[in-house]
Image (cartoon, rainbow, N blue to C red):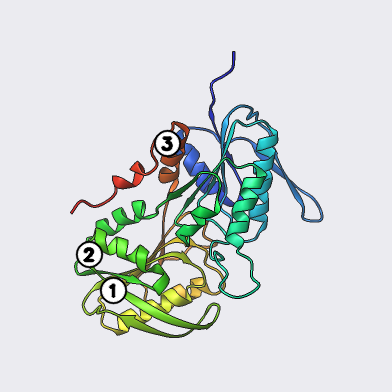
Amino acid sequence: MHNQTEIKLIAGRASQDLAKAISLEMGIELCDVQVNVFSDGEFQPVINDSIRGNHVFIIQSTFQPSDNLMELLMLIDATKRASAKYISVVMPYYGYARQDRKDRPRVSIASKLVASMLTTAGASRVMTMDLHADQIQGFFEIPMDHLFGSSVFVKYIQNLGLDNLCMASPDVGSTKRTRFYAQQFNCDMVICDKYRKRANEIAEMTLIGDVKGKNVILIDDIIDTGNTLCKAADLIMEKGAMSVRAICTHPVLSGKAFENIQNSSLKELVVTDSIPLKKTSDKINVISVASLFANAIENTFHYKSIHSLFTNNIIKS
């Protein structure tokens, strides 16, 4: 007689802390995985527990270096070859998501390539959070669950108890995301319109809308170098705002990001633990999404709705 299918959790090296928090939330131990590293830098993940016939959830964000993506692909391949019944990939941060279209001749659409590689490796399903572009969901021929960081951020903003709230988009690309928050709190929104001469370098920025006497919250999905966000925060304060905070789901924080944040007008930057912080900062506040992913994993396993996890968090006006 066959055993009933169980949930098995596997953690990649990039998301150890988040995976441990998810396993604690679920009361399920992580599978024993060791990674053999060879002298040339090549590595080999080995799953030491039996996962035959089970529904395996592999937890790994794919921020840089690209070894994190390679390790995830190898874990999927190892899981498939170990006769797992179903392989769900949980990637809180989807790397290469900003390369989602051909914005100039002769470039790769890398986020589509990543989708193809995950599928080819053997993933049955992919779960991620706050994609840089919604259309990436269409790059998959397998089910893709898109979770929203707003389910933890909305509650956080509520608890701040701020008057004269105003939501701000640091660039035109984040207007849809920002409008959602503005609707939730029934408040105004403004847009910072930037013009770039080259990547990660802003030539000029203008503010569309009025922030005078308001407590402003900048909304974005990714904070990388922090140049755009910090410039937007400084501009907002120059235009007479009472305070400015930022909410960004994925703390990539490369280059001089920590320095930029520390020296900016930002009162606070709130992020999730989709990517572990390289170092701490008294201006950066991390909210865990372990509970959100634990619930999503449970619902996936029991064939329950994922959408229901978000409808309960929407503010009823």
User: What residue is rendered at 45% in x and 44% in y?
Assistant: 293
Going by the numbered disc 1, the residue's amino acid type is Ser
| Quarter where residue 174 is shown | bottom left
**Disc 2 residue type (three-letter):** Leu
Amino acid type at circle 3 is Asn
Circle 2 is placed at which residue position? Answer: 162
Tell me the SS state at disc 3: helix
Q: Residue 299: give its label.
A: 3
Which residue is found at the position 74% from the left and 49% from the top?
43
* Disc 2: CA contacts within 10 A as few (<14), some (14-19) or many (>=20): few
With respect to residue 53, does 36 lie above or below? below
Mark 1 and mark 3: Cα distance apart in space: 39 Å
Identify the mark nearer the N-term, 3 or 2. 2
Look at the picture and state if 178 lies above or below 62: below
Marks 1, 3: nearer the viewer: 3
Marks 3/2: CA distance?
34 Å
Q: Contact (CB < 8 A) between labels 2 and 1?
A: yes
**Marks 1 and 3 in Cβ contact (< 8 Å):** no
Residue 85 found in image quarter? top right
Specify whether residue 171 is in view.
no
Dot 3 alpha-carbon crowd within 10 angstroms: few under 14, some 14 to 19, many 20 or more: some
Disc 1 secondary structure class: strand
Q: Which mark lies nearer to you, 3 or 2?
A: 3
Give the residue at mark 1: 243
Q: Are marks 3 and 2 in contact (CB under 8 Å)?
A: no
Say whether residue 16 is visible: yes
Q: Quadrant of residue 121?
A: top right
Quarter in which the N terminus is drawn: top right
- Say the numbered circle drawn on residue 148: none
The image position of residue 58, as x and y in percent, is 58, 42
Residue 10, percent from left and from top: 59, 39
